[in-house]
Amino acid sequence: MSAVLGELTARAYSLVEIGDLPSAQLLLADALAHVDTDPRHASATLADAAGLHSRVLIRLGEPHSARGWAQFAYVAANRLYGPGHEQTIQAAATLATVLQRLNHFSESSHLYAEVIEGLTALQGPESRQVLAAHADLATVEYARGDCDTARARIAEAWDMTREAYGDADPAGIKMLARLGAMERDCGKFTEAHQHLAHARELCRQYLPPEHPMAAQVATLSRAPANPDHLCNGHALPAAPARHAASNDAPPPEPAPEPVAHEDPVPPEVAESWWPPTDDGSDPPPNLPVPVGHREPPARRRGPAPLVLAALIAAALGAVAVIIGLSAVDQQPDRDPDTGPVAAPSASASSTPAPSSAPPTPSPTPSPARPGTPPTSVKLVDNRNSITLSWTYPAGAKAPVRLAGAPEGQQQRSFQDLPAGSSSYVVHGLAQDTDFCFTVSVVYSTRVVGRAPVVCTARAR
């Protein structure tokens, strides 16, 4: 029986490799229809087939059907190989993904932590799969409402991915886009716009237009903020206390776990169990090949909850990077710097006070003359960041454009902001170089109101 199951599993692997997931699922379903479903009796061949079946079901969008086989493979792998073995870690990653899809975030987060610990011991803290597992754990933490921890974790994972594998790495671009989406749902609209714009620019610079990551980042950038997201202080509810119930009263049911906003970007670590391809391209999704050991660089720790600076944009010389991307047409309807405007509160009295004359309406500012620049432009140099502030022209309805460069070099546009914006923080610049900036209001393609240039004055 084991030999036959091994042959069928090998055929299923071949079907997965060519992308025929439905045929692989049918083949595995038939092969596993009459096996002993007690994982304590499972052979290595059966555990492998069960794990493959669960991964195929995940890819086909059937997490409920995948859960039983994923649990089976995880328990069997622990018994067969021990908790630190590659096969066991792979099974844990698969089960964590299933539970994440089913919104069982507490169990999923525990498994992702187990995956991170095991992979770090095998590969080191900067391996691709360790960083991917951190990104997935951050997604679970975010779904639970632990948003500060989640954003800090995925920001640090992105930073380490960028340092280890470069700006062009698709996994790093995916983490950056996810960070932006989290920030948008948490009301951090300026940071969200910066990170999503940066991710789109990296896709444009380094990935072909047909690359799947470009479409995923575009989808995330267009998506609105999730109005149902609860940010911080709203983690999974604790199990209900046990009370001495009366004979005719049923025990209280546990509160349901929060429903996660559907993420168009799939989990990271479940997609990363691949052998390298000859051309460097991404392998087909979810090919369940055990991960091989790679010698990792030993200079960095694993990601931890650290707050990461917001934007590192397209190159300003050789010492700084600023994004030169105009995205006015993709701004949300609210002002990223101020958030939505609250409705005025009603008066405590239901009856208005008598008045002998109608109230005087508030004056409406007349439209600004085209070409009117922003005024009172100020620059605050914090060394690791630069804060720009200005007074927006009264009555104007045009977007703001920021340009900058190292002192003495030609400035280039790096950020567009919605009408009414009055401040911006620039991160990621070299601390031993002076920079100059120009704030403008763009009334049309031909009419631009530019404020005087402001520059840092750093001691050399």
Image (tube, rainbow, N blue to C red):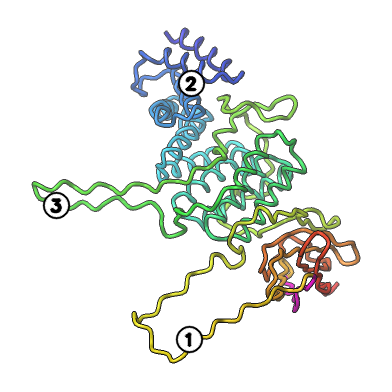
The nearer-to-camera label among 3 and 1 is 1
For label 3, the residue is 244
Q: Nearer the viewer, residue 318 or 313?
A: 313
Residue 384: % across, % down: 72, 66
Residue drawn at point x = 62 percent, y = 66 percent? 337
Residue 214: % across, % down: 68, 39
C-alpha span from label 2 to label 3? 46 Å
Mark 2 Cα shell of 10 Å, populated few (<14), some (14-19), many (≥20): many
Relative to 373, residue 106 above or below: above
Q: Nearer the viewer, residue 231 or 31?
A: 231
Q: Is residue 454 magenta?
A: no
For label 2, the residue is 48
Tell me the magenta residue range: 371-382
Q: Are marks 2 and 3 in contact (CB under 8 Å)?
A: no
Q: Is residue 381 magenta?
A: yes
Amino acid type of disc 1?
Pro
